[in-house]
Amino acid sequence: MRLSTITNLAYAITLIFTTVSATTFILSARSALQERAAIQDHLDLDDLAEELAITADERTEEARLYVMRGDDQYLAKFYVDEDQEKRLESNLDKLAAHGVSPSEEKLFQTIRTSADALDGMEREAVSLYRAGRQGDAQRILFGDQYHQRHSALVDTVATLRETIAARTQATIDQAKNRSDFYGSIAKVMLGLTALMFLAVLYFVLSRRVAVPLIKMSNIVKRLARQDYSIDLPDEGRRDEIGEMNEAIRIFRSNGLERERLDAEHRKNQRIKDLILQMMHRIQACQNQLELSDVVSKFMPQIFPAISGRLLVLKENSSFLHSTGQWSDPSFSAPDFAIDDCWALRRGRPHISNPDGDDVVCHHISGEFGTGLCIPLTALGETVGLLYLEVPEKSATLETERLYLELLAENIGLAVANLQLRQRLVGMAKQDALTGLLNRRSLDEALNRHIEKPDDPLACLMLDIDHFKRFNDRFGHDAGDAVMQYVAQVLSEAIGDQGHLFRFGGEEFTVLMPGANLEHAKALAEKLRHAVEHAPFTYRGRSLDPVTISVGIATAPGAGTVTSVLERADAALLSAKETGRNRWVSFDTA
């Protein structure tokens, strides 16, 4: 209820109480006036009754004195006061005018009868006395009959006085009680009015205003400190305080929404910052291993609730291989064919959800939540796949999907650039015909060993014997086939004992870091034997056996690293001059 309504209602009730109180005060005052009027009537009636009694006694006394003493003044007074009979009637009429009861009316009639009888006896006694019959006159006025009638008159007058006094006293008491009753009501209503005023004052100011204002003050202080965790209960008030509470509730809701937006903005900004850092590091990666490590480090920071893998499609292959993972993905196989993923088939991101309406990728199996596959493409070609998963089956990843696709696009470009770079590096460092490391790679390897001159190094220079003969008899294609054949045999025979390079033409070089002369001789013999006994055919024809000559040099035993190639080449020349299909060591030549 609104404060204005409460105030108006309290004002109306107070007005009613005040009106009732004023009315009862007026009634009490009127009752007091009636009480005073009743008292006055009581006094007037008592005076009339007393005068009635006195008149009856005086008339009797004058008649008796006259017949006793014979004094004419008493007779004169008796006749002069003869009109007292009229006074008696007048007093009776006055008494009747004040209102009489039936019993009082009866008493009035008795008084009149007694007064008339006494008046007759008195007149008779006066007549007898004037006629000289004094004794008869005295016997009449002093006789028992006169005495009885006189006493009866006096008693009747006394009874009338008592009756009138009782009646008027009752009227006085009734008026007094009525006055006291209305006065009490007036006082009670006045007290109720005062209580109503105090109650309304307490209720409005204390309960409806002061207490809510104190609560709102504390709430506003906390909201001013941006503490939106405070709870605002809905008290259902429909007054001004309720409107203020509603305004504060709206302010709190706006604050919570602003805080949520700020948190979301900070989250988005953090994601953007991490993505930017990730992109900077991806651009600085030198190989796919570094790229996978960067992705595996940053993805859990950007999306803590999402686990996944980075899968790369190797060149000239239809299988995807996992190069990095984060947060332990378990729904998908680490390696699978391109056809097992609907995203790679369609060239678009694909969500696999057991409760969804779309098909599930074949590389996802068992009990799983939601999987998201995003193809990694560059220049229209697929280079890999970004696989992501969450344990919730109902998740759609729509909130993070924009960022994920942006990351996938950049990761795809990075993978393509690294593959292109790897191919370019391979073209720069590898021999196009044999696939072996070329002369440039050999120079770089030697430069690295030059920086460590005290580390042992063995160098083997190999040359295919009579190589020109193969070109002349079978053509350059056959020569290339022989070159490739020898390179393959040498690579398999060397294994992890050294590094094989194509020095140029039909010459090859083997570097053996940490090897001594004995190790080099053993490997040289192994290589010579492997090439000599490996069968070789070209276009269905068996060719002559292929042999090689080998020159051996070591460092720092017989010279420095910078001269190891020259010494090994000199040893090779010696091996050719001494019959070919053999090895010669510069250290012992």
Image (cartoon, rainbow, N blue to C red):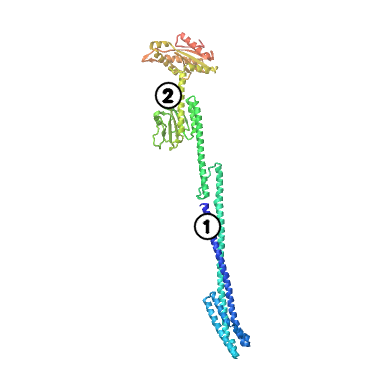
Instruction: For mark 2, give the secondary structure.
Output: loop
Please state which of residues 160 and 425 is positioned toward the viewer in this rendering: 160
Query: Which amino acid type is shown beneath numbered disc 1?
Result: Ala
Circles 2, 1 touching at the beta carbon (< 8 Å): no
Query: Is any part of residue 471 visible from this angle?
Result: yes
At label 1, counting other C-alpha atoms closer than 10 Å, the crowd grade (few under 14, some 14-19, many 20 or more) is few
Please state which of residues 102 and 397 is positioned toward the viewer in this rendering: 102
- What is the CA distance from the residue labelled 2 to the residue labelled 1? 95 Å
The spot of residue 340 in percent (x, y) is 39, 30
User: Which mark's residue is nearer the viewer, 2 or 1?
Assistant: 1
The spot of residue 181 in percent (x, y) is 55, 66
Query: Which amino acid type is shown beneath numbered disc 2?
Result: Glu
| Quarter of the figure with residue 313 | top left
Residue at mark 1: 12
Compared with residue 197, is residue 139 higher up or lower down, i.e. above or below?
Answer: below
Q: Residue furthest bottom?
A: 132
Point out which mark residue 315 bears.
2
